[in-house]
Amino acid sequence: MNSKIKTIFITGCSSGIGLVAAKGLRDRGYRVIAGCRKPADYERLVQLGFDTVLIDLDDANSIEQAAKQVLSLCNGTLFALFNNAGFGVYGSLMSISRAQLESQFSTNVFGVHQLTQLLLPVMLPHGCGRIIQTSSIMGFISTPGRGAYAASKYALEAWSDALRLELRSTGIKVCLIEPGPINTAFTRNVNQTEQHQKVENPPIAKRFALPPEAILPCLYHALESPSPKIRYRITLVTKVSAFLKRLLPDKLMDLILKNK
């Protein structure tokens, strides 16, 4: 790219990982375009000095309008897209309706696909760039009560793997960030389908939870290294779980995960 200042569009900037990433990257010298869903968060991000775009990943028209705004703001010099926004539907699979499952995938997968499809063409001519997704520990393991959310993150991981291979000769790198327990509003905002038996994080997750700032070194490396990692596992819980997933037979993993 000709411009020394690199522009990145980040979705889900109202709080947590997205807000921390937006602030950290701006302090690092990036031009950040911040995406959020709620008008109140839009006003707050504008007051913080960000170029801000309203985007609801569960709404195809909203994504299309947001992409047009981003393209206008970046003037053809978008370096990176950080697909961070997402939410969780928790509850036993038999308690989740088709509409709820569709909404889960609409935000966490279909919206990511549409947004990337709309913004990628402006990145390709430069022969460099990054597309980064916030996945989850649930992108490679699934536990009772989190099946819908895990299914959407498994899908996002497969989608990212295919995109990475399809873009291998373009100079654009595709990376996944896989947080485990992070202290954000995500868990409080989960859509619980069974109020009488809410899905709670196990004590070990709470014990090893990290602040959202823990993602920043990995995010910087993903954006700036000439050879970024394919997957960045953030917390000890995520790293240990990935190791056990590779090492142990499925039935033993089931015994470990059945009450998680």
Image (tube, rainbow, N blue to C red):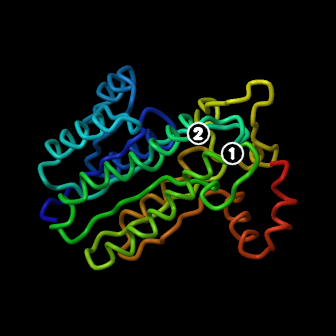
- Point out residue 258 in the picture as x, y percentages from the top left corner: 84, 52
- x 17%, y 48%: residue: 74
Residue under pointer 2: 88
Q: What residue type is labelled 1?
A: Arg
Please tell me whether residue 229 is drawn above or below residue 193 in the rendered image: below
Q: Which amino acid does label 2 sit on?
A: Gly
Residue 80 point in image, percent of width and height: 30, 57
> For numbered disc 1, what is the local secondary structure?
loop
C-beta proximity under 8 Å, tags 1 and 2:
yes
Image position of 171 (left or right of 21) = left
Mark drawn on residue 207: none
At 77% from the left edge and 46% from the top edge, which residue is drawn? 207
Chain-order first, disc 1 or disc 2: 2
Give the image location of residue 224, x and y in percent.
36, 66
In the displayed orientation, state which residue is furthest to the top: 40
Q: Name the residue under label 1.
A: 146
In the image, residue 75 above or below residue 37? below
Disc 1 to disc 2, C-alpha distance = 8 Å
